[in-house]
Amino acid sequence: MTFWLLLTVNSITFGSLLFLLAAGFSLIFGLMRIPNLTHGSLFMLGAYFGATFVGGMLGMMFNFWVAAVMAALLVAAFGAVIERLLLRRLPGQQMAQVLVTLGISFIVADFCLMVWGGDPVAVATPDTLVGSVRLGPMIFPIYRIAVIGIAVVVAIALWLLLDRTRLGAMIRAGVDDPDMARVVGIRVSRLFTIVFALGAGIAAFAGVIGGPILTVYPGLDQYMLPLALVVVILGGSGSLLGSVVGSLIIGVLYNFGQALLPELAYFVLFLPMVLVLLLRPQGLFGRFIP
Amino acid sequence: MSRKLTRRTFMTATAAGAAAATFKFPTPAIAQAAPFKLGLLTVKTGPLAQGGIQMEQGVLTWLKLHGNKMAGRKVEFISADTGGKPAGTKTKAQELIERDKVDVILGPLAAFELLAISDYIREHKTPTLSLAGADDITQRKPNPYFLRPSATSSQAMHVMGHYTAKEMGKKKAICIDYDFAFGYEQQGGFQAAFEKDGGCVANKLWVPLGTPDYTPYLAQMTGIDVLCQGFAGSGPLAFMKQYANIGLKFPVVTGETGGDDALLHAFGDEALGMMSTCPYTLDLDTDANKKFAQAMFKNFKVVPGFYAAGLYINCDVVEAALKASGGTTHDKEKFMAALKAVKLKDTPRGPISFDHLGNVVGNFYVRRIEKAKNPYGLKLWNKTVKTYENVSQFWTWPEKEFLAHPVYSRNYPPLKKC
């Protein structure tokens, strides 16, 4: 009983974390048609920044939430720079863009190794969320439940942004038909910078939020990237609902797959991706076929 | 460090050759004039980077303390990053042997890396000293060009299994480890020794390397009185944190990587009380160890753990063999014999010698993580509670009997009903 309950709750927690990771990826993929292979690195970079701010830097210790926002802003700025200086110069050249983002991910990995070394870095859990709660027969850490709440808040904020604001309408127009959007006077190229920065910022935020659970270590980027990829392919790129559903499905498959069929854990995780690509290439809720 | 043939080295070499031709120098003099080439295969990227970087720091510390000389010969040190992948290890080993023509290879780090190059180093007769596990390379399929001054994957776990059953009085365990050779061999060793002394392993769980969330495995920990983990690098940190968060309180025991001294600064209170067995311990109160640990701390602002100490001791062993062989490695068989004959009284891990298969016989330390005063200002400290002297890779089994069993694997020893 405890076993099933624990796995179920953890599936939702892990799904929430995956949502935070994948939401930005989905936006970037949806609007710019770039499978952004730096996404795992931006997640890791955010986590390292967060760990540094929380752990104390230049004699100043930052509150966990302040640190998360600062890390998100820093990495968002980095994302804007990548878009402006590199991706902008390769419009429509998907292969070149994939290679550039892959290259940047290696550079970021080496940068992190240089700055933070190979030692794993723990991010302290925010004081108010330390400890565990009893849920029926099991004990579950409060922080992991809080992650679900954070993901819900971010999902609602993104939904409001995309659905209720002018910027959101322009982004949706850009996702659906970039050429037509240009014709009606939307500056799609500026939108690209905004979306790339936003996606990078959310990834970094996710990194800080994930920090207390996962700890940060070299290689975290390469572990998280395929998870983001599988969520977005499953849910459909450019779709917020797709990211939510995709991450929950992957959260469940990840947890139950590893616990029940450890030998086949990756098979269970990536089989739905293969099926979706074959049968419904735009993903469950996708707006276009990549 | 220059690997290229510069004009100057070319001139020197030519001059030396001409001189040798003219004056007929005794050959060892020429051998000693050339630098001794020491290659290192390590991992500086990915989840194993923590240990890999310590390996390099261990070698650099040794070289610095010895004026960059080994048995009187200048050392040319070439470090290569394998990326922690068998294919990368093979490529880098080829570069070191065929391009750089190294005299000795130190490393690689991981058991699966060593397995990938074992045949290759044997073909090229390159003496290799590593801390990688891969038990069979000094057991059922011995490689005559391989020497392991650290420990087999199972060597420390034999001790841990015995201690857990006899001294801690535990009866029923679950083992959790990585899904590769090092994990299988560690937990096989734990299970064999633990069950020999009356314990029983209820289940062994295998986790992919780099797993970020251990909760799906933790959900299965019930009905036991002790847990044995064998993670390495960043693994122990995330694992112990998640273990404590979920309210589990069984005592945790581990091997040399899971309780590595180099991780002490990153562990939090969740690691208090964890028991580990290691062939090296930072709290060993000898001059050799203090000299090494203080130099590490001074050079790199970190305390050494198992990986740094392992490579530092590798250097001690190479130097001792080089002295014994008159400073030359040209006769590979003779040099290997000299390596295996090395007996050192005073390394940072205490006295060591080798068995006829090239594996270390030495001390193993059972430690507990405590809050204790220490010279490095760490919050947590591994305190040695028991020392086992002269432990061989066969533990207390006779060699013949031990080697008659298959190597520890995913399914060996098989699980019994507990």
Image: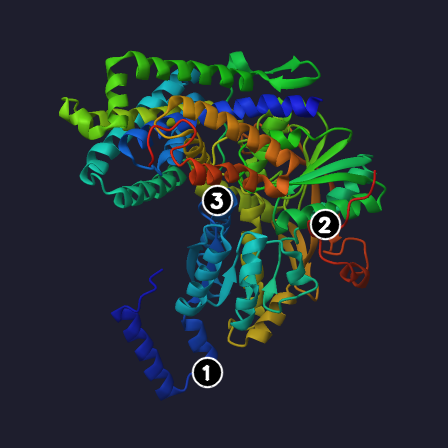
At 35% from the left edge and 81% from the top edge, which residue is drawn? Answer: B17
Tell me whether the residue at label 3 lies in contact with that at label 2, contact meaning CB atoms closer than 8 angstroms.
no
Front position among marks 3 and 2: 2
Which residue in the structure is indicated by mark 1? B26
Q: Which labelled disc corresponds to residue B411?
A: 2
Q: Is residue B385 left or right of residue A198?
A: right
The front one of B355 and A98 is A98
At 23% from the left edge and 20% from the top edge, which residue is drawn? Answer: A170
Q: Quadrant of residue A185?
A: top left
At 34% from the left edge and 78% from the top edge, which residue is drawn? Answer: B16
Please rate how many residues cluster around mark 2, counting C-alpha atoms within 10 Å: few if below 14, some from 14 to 19, many from 20.
few
Please state the chain letter of the residue tagged with numbered disc 2 in the rendered image: B
Residue B46, how many percent across, how many down? 46, 44
- SS class, disc 3: helix
User: Where B195 sits versus A78, above or below?
Assistant: below
Work out whether mark 2 precedes mark 1 in sequence or the reverse, and give the earlier one.
1
- SS class, disc 1: loop
Please rate how many residues cluster around mark 3, counting C-alpha atoms within 10 Å: few if below 14, some from 14 to 19, many from 20.
many
- SS class, disc 2: loop
Residue B331, how many percent across, how many down? 54, 77
Please state the chain letter of the residue tagged with numbered disc 1 in the rendered image: B
Residue extending furthest toward the front: A279
Residue extending furthest toward the right: B198
Which residue in the structure is indicated by mark 3? B49
Q: Looking at numbered disc 2 in the image, what kind of residue is underneath it?
A: Asn
Please state the chain letter of the residue tagged with numbered disc 3 in the rendered image: B
Residue B6, how many percent across, how many down? 27, 68
